[in-house]
Image (tube, coloured by chain):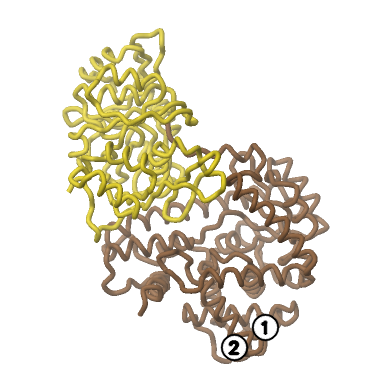
Amino acid sequence: MRLRDISASEAAARLITGDINIDLGVAAFGVQSALPDVQRVFYQLYGDYELLDEASPADFRVAVQSPKSLRRWYKPQIHFLLDDFVPFLPLPRSQAYPVLEWGMNWCMASHMHKYLLLHGAVLEKDGKAIIFPAPPGSGKSTLTAYLAHTGWRLLSDEMTVINLETGLVHPFVRPICLKNNSIDLVKSWFPDVSISNIARDTNKGDVAHVKPPIASVDHIKQTVQVMAVVLPKYTPDVSLDIYSLTKADAFQALSDNAFNDSVLGADGFLALQRLVENTAAVEIHYNDLAEVLAFLNEGQFSA
Amino acid sequence: MSTTAKYTAHLVKLLSGDIPQSISLLDWEYLIRIARDASVLPRMAYALDTDGDSLPEYARTHLISAKYHAKLLAQQVQFEATEFKRILTKFHHEDVYYLKGAAYTLSGCDAGIGRVFSDIDMLVSKENLREIEARLSVYAWFSQPNDDYDDMYYRQWAHEIPPLKHSGRGTILDLHHNLVPIISGKAPEITDFTEGARSLACGARVLAPEAMILHSAVHLFYQEEYHHGFRDLSDLHLLFSEFGTQQTFWDALFILAQKTGFGLEIALALRYTTSLFDTPVPSTVLQKSQVWLPSRPKLVVYDWVYKRVLQPHHKLCNVPGLTLANMMALVRGHWIKMPVHILLMHTAAKGYRNVLKWVAGKGVNKPDSAKNNAPPGP
């Protein structure tokens, strides 16, 4: 049963008690929140995902709640919980939904070490995946949203999940997190796409989340071979420049963007090494997404 | 059996490497959450066979993850010990001792396998303390930003200085000059504890087994906050089990406890490890320790409190009376550590700050530099 198979009001009631356990492929998340805006956006963005039954365990039981301080009456805040643990200081009330998404990423990065986890998007076409590792501000999420709606399958916007034994990439399909100007851009390119309301003034600026395409959600357990690593760098005055990366540079770039390579120790190093040895790697400077798309569609990477 | 007793009993079993009969996947979820909350998940992972097929994939995933964490921690403490050896050359061979988690891990004893800890505890003599602190600061170990009250509390009354943090690696170091607060009037002659200390292959020094275990017991029963009580009692269980096979160990332990005035703590440690973990302790030893136990009515209260606070505190364990027991342990923890007039002052200062937190939200007492704690993400 998918989340959208139950009504919004039933979903809200079950979110209050925490009786929503959603299958994200590599992990199951039990979600609790009594905040109506969180319930609404969650229902909007996760409608296509499978709900797990009562007997299924969740890998993480998370919640977004208002802390019980008097401050809730004059400058309300919210906090994120994993089980009973509060990993961050409270944040302004308006950021409740993004905090849920970021908190879920934190759960993975801090506790899911069966995989190598990188900060990066993954998209796939014709059975070959490209990883886009990138720090914030590189235009990665805008590029991801664009590709995910122009023929590429979204595996992940935020977190690349690599199997330590097979080297294959696992989907971790989640809503795409858009920032500032890119929210309006994506809206203008793809008017039919479902986008959450905007959370203003987060530590990343204005933020909105894009509902992932249903085809991506339907293939949430389908692993893929990685073909290439592409480091995106949005550059206002360059339409598209492509730089080939040496293996050493590619390794460094992936390692810089890894969440848990140090926790994995030697296993993390070996997983990164295998990834670099079996893929081509380029850095692209761009301002024209159509050109990037054409380049990726041709798939002519020199290893 | 109530569900409460069920999960605690399951956890005790898992920590000794046995998988309880007929536990569902949901039971596994609960047990993993309880174990993570109690900081014993990696210990449980090392006790079980995570390579074979005796475990469901769900459990294996979380246990493997916990093992990676513990392995990294063990490497880090090994690294820091090497660093300290280099930095503190002048003192290292006669006057630097690792305590608690770091000591268990560095010495490779059973209690160190999968033991997690958030800071490294080190004991040095009081006369060298200033110089060691100064020397550490040259190598980027700095006092954590605290408020003035905390600083005064540490410097005047405690047995340790405010935590030092390495500004590059973020490792926290607790530098002690005694094992219990000086203000309690019960601080032992520290040389009684350091006598017989062992040098490890890596050059680090740890206390002799009897001193290590006595400190572990004193630390547990001098606490105000028992969130890690179950883990700490599990430490004692493992330490007793490993070292208790020799009668000479028990003799040395009892002599040291008598000499330093910590008989009660050893008697309680034996009482609760044997009752919760079924620790193998010779009956003569158990019997001998009973002279240190308090009078019958007092013991009934102790049992009521400690049999609760030394269980896992997770809500899924739903220990009846835990809130009251926690409060009583908190009061006792303060009571034995501070004379009444200091205790009242301390309570007032802490209370004021809690009111501030309640009104203005968490983080209000912290200096600005400590407030930038945002979740990761794009």
Q: Position of residue B259 (x, y in %)?
A: 75, 80
State which chain is coloured brown: B
Q: Chain of mark 2?
A: B
Tell me: A94 left or right of B373. Answer: left
Q: Position of residue B175 (x, y in %)?
A: 70, 55
Name the image quarter holding the N terminus of chain B: bottom left
Query: Mark 2 touching mark 1, by CB under 8 A?
Result: yes
Residue B94 is at least partly visible in this image:
no
> Where is residue A273, by image quadrant?
top left
Point 47% across, 47% down: residue: A66
State which chain is coloured yellow: A
Q: Which residue is mark 1?
A: B254
Q: Chain of mark 1?
A: B
Circle 1 crowding by C-alpha within 10 Å: few under 14, some 14–19, many from 20: many
Q: Position of residue B225 (x, y in %)?
A: 60, 64
Tell me: B257 left or right of A223. Answer: right
Q: Secondary structure at mark 2?
A: helix
Point 30% across, 29% down: residue: A195
Q: Nearer the viewer, residue B66 or A41?
A: A41
Q: Which residue is mark 2?
A: B285
Circle 2 crowding by C-alpha within 10 Å: few under 14, some 14–19, many from 20: some
Q: Nearer the viewer, residue B187 or A278?
A: B187
Name the image quarter holding the C terminus of chain B: top left
Point 49% across, 71% down: residue: B311
Residue B216's place in the image compared with A176, above or below, is below
Asked if badge 2 and badge 1 are on a common chain, one would say yes
**Nearest to N terminus: mark 2 or mark 1:** 1
Residue B283's place in the image compared with A143, above or below, is below
Amino acid at circle 1: Phe
Amino acid at circle 2: Val
